[in-house]
Image (spheres, rainbow, N blue to C red):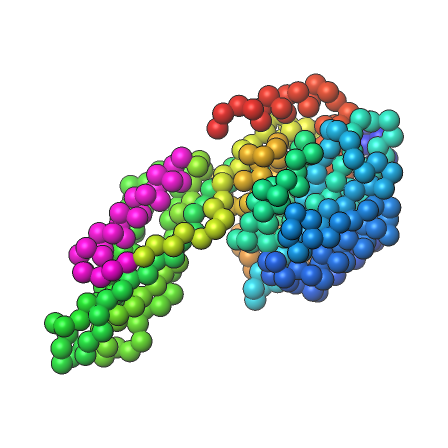
Amino acid sequence: MDPVKSRIGAEVDALAGDLFKVSEYLYNNPEIGYQEFKACEFLSRFMEERGFKSERGTGGVQTAFLARPAIRPKGRPCVAFLAEYDALPGVGHGCGHNLIAAASVGAALALGRNLGEVQGTLALVGTPAEEGGGGKILLAEAGVFSEMDAAMMCHPSRLNRPGEEMFGRVKFKVEFFGQAAHASVSPDRGVNALDAMVAAYNNISMLRQQIRPDARIHGIITHGGDAPNIIPQYTAGLFYVRAASRKYRDEVYKKVEKCIEAAAVATGAGHKIEVGQPTFDPIKRNPPLEEAARANMEALGISVDQDDGRRGSSDIGNLSFYLPAIHPSAAIVDPEVPGHSKIFAEATMSPRGKDALLKAAKFLAMTAYDFLALAELREKVKEAFNQKE
């Protein structure tokens, strides 16, 4: 192994106790998106105590931060390590963001102490509200990544992977407006908004048979009426449309709109569709950077798993259209354990979770080192990024 990479690995091992404390603090203090005040302050101060300069509220986002090494705060190329730290309502860190943040902290510290004569520098970016809030999108739009050349993080998972596809996602609220009436005495004078919602739901269910395997539609009825003896005059639902490309995501969404419009016409109800922001893009993968990550994973004895075809969505998809980005995963549970669960959260604190944390910090730092040290790799990464979707 390259001597610098050996030193990086040793540095992460020396930091192990501190990194476990980072993960444990976040685990014990879960905060939902844009409310991560404790996490932002804790992580900023943690980096400052170890030779970094931190900027809180970076990009105009209150619970975001940007930490740079004091000895080399700026320069090009620059690699950004992404630290997520928002939790899920009622589940805490059921997506393992405590481990994500700790691994990125470890990678930033280990590489920062071993930059030597290598070209460029690094940054640790605290990115809040990944769980639907799109923190990375706001930071990218604010120009936080404008002087950075690549971004990376590692997500705890059921698999060890250098990267995988993600779905783009549109989130939207549907409302139907009818006319209330006595359900027994004067049903003919009512316009049933629940019938409209059920018709729309069934139309969308039938559409599912006609979409490609690389798309998903799912939703819930959030308000179905007030009493059985009143024709419902108002109903509401929340839906997601996902797909593996921006083009097909938008195409499926347009079909869903037609399903909803048809339900309104059939029942005589009025309707309104409100698209939630931000819309998530699928990830623009970067094969050369993923291959560098794969090589470092294997050098650490991590057995890379086959892709199982399961997909989620994340705001790193949008970020990957601003600059080259990778989103490797590290297994902390067996494949049958569901994400977004308390069991998954507990796994981040297990011996397997702690081992994955250290390995993730190591291969992230080593991959970033490759990017900074190898002009040929940077050129390949740039060429891959510039290719059309």
Location of the N terminus (image quadrant): top right
Residue 67 in sight here: yes
Residues shaded magenta: 247-271
- Check the image and report above or below for 253 versus 284: below
Task: State the predominant SS element of the stretch in magenta.
Answer: helix
Query: Residue 288: x percent and y percent?
Result: 63, 25
The residue lying furthest to the top in this view is: 376
**Which residue occupies 69% across, 53% down?**
57
Q: Is residue 264 magenta?
A: yes
Expressed as whole percent of the image width and height from the top left, the position of residue 48 reads 83, 51
Res 215 → quadrant = top left
Q: How many marks?
A: 0
Q: Left or right: where does residue 334 sit relative to residue 179?
A: right
Between residue 228 and residue 176, name the one nearer to us: 176
- x 22%, y 61%: residue: 269
Quadrant of residue 219 in the image? Answer: bottom left
Residue 72 located left or right of residue 273: right
Location of residue 230 by image quarter: bottom left
Residue 335 lies in the magenta-colored region: no
Residue drawn at point x = 48 percent, y = 51 percent: 277
Q: Residue 125 at x, y = what percent?
A: 70, 45
Q: Is residue 299 left or right of residue 383?
A: right
Q: Residue 36: image x %, image y %?
A: 66, 60
Residue sitting at x 58%, y 39%: 319
Q: Is residue 352 visible?
A: no
Look at the picture and state if 100 lies above or below 285. below
